[in-house]
């Protein structure tokens, strides 16, 4: 694959007729993401299709940072990444 191919974006488009567009839209499962669901409801022609992916991260209680470490990291990031 050439590097230029990574930057090619040729999105699918829906028909301009709103009545035809809604019925022509592929049926997909309701999104788990609330923001995406809101966008699909409020702007039905804004998104042609989407793919749901499994989460890449799992919430593991043992890996959770305690408050002291979390505050320290926050201060570090604020100080070094402005």
Image (cartoon, rainbow, N blue to C red):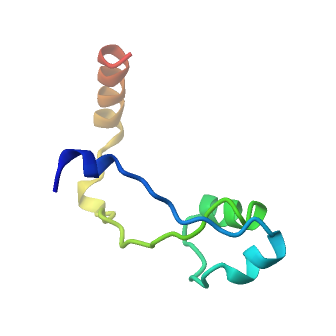
| Residue at left offset 20%, top offset 46% | 3
x%, y% of residue 74?
Answer: 36, 28
x%, y% of residue 16?
Answer: 75, 65
| Residue at left offset 78%, top offset 78% | 20
Q: Quadrant of residue 77?
A: top left
Looking at the image, which is closer to me, 48 or 73? Answer: 48
- Give the total of numbered labels: 0
Q: Give the quadrant of the N terminus.
A: bottom left
Q: Is residue 49 left or right of residue 10?
A: right
| Residue at left offset 29%, top offset 21% | 76
x%, y% of residue 54?
Answer: 36, 73
Q: Give the quadrant of the C terminus.
A: top left
Q: Residue furthest right?
A: 19
Q: Is residue 77 left or right of residue 19?
A: left
| Residue at left offset 77%, top offset 61% | 42
Q: Is residue 47 above or below residue 23?
A: above
x%, y% of residue 45?
Answer: 71, 64
């Amino acid at each position: 694959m050439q590097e230029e191919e990574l930057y090619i974006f040729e999105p699918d488009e829906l028909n301009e007729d709103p009545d035809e567009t809604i019925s022509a839209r592929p049926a997909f499962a309701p999104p788990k993401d609330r923001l995406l669901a809101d966008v699909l409801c409020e702007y039905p022609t804004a998104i042609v299709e989407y793919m749901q992916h499994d989460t890449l991260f799992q919430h593991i209680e043992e890996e959770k940072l305690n408050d002291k470490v979390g505050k320290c990291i926050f201060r570090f990031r604020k100080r070094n990444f402005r």
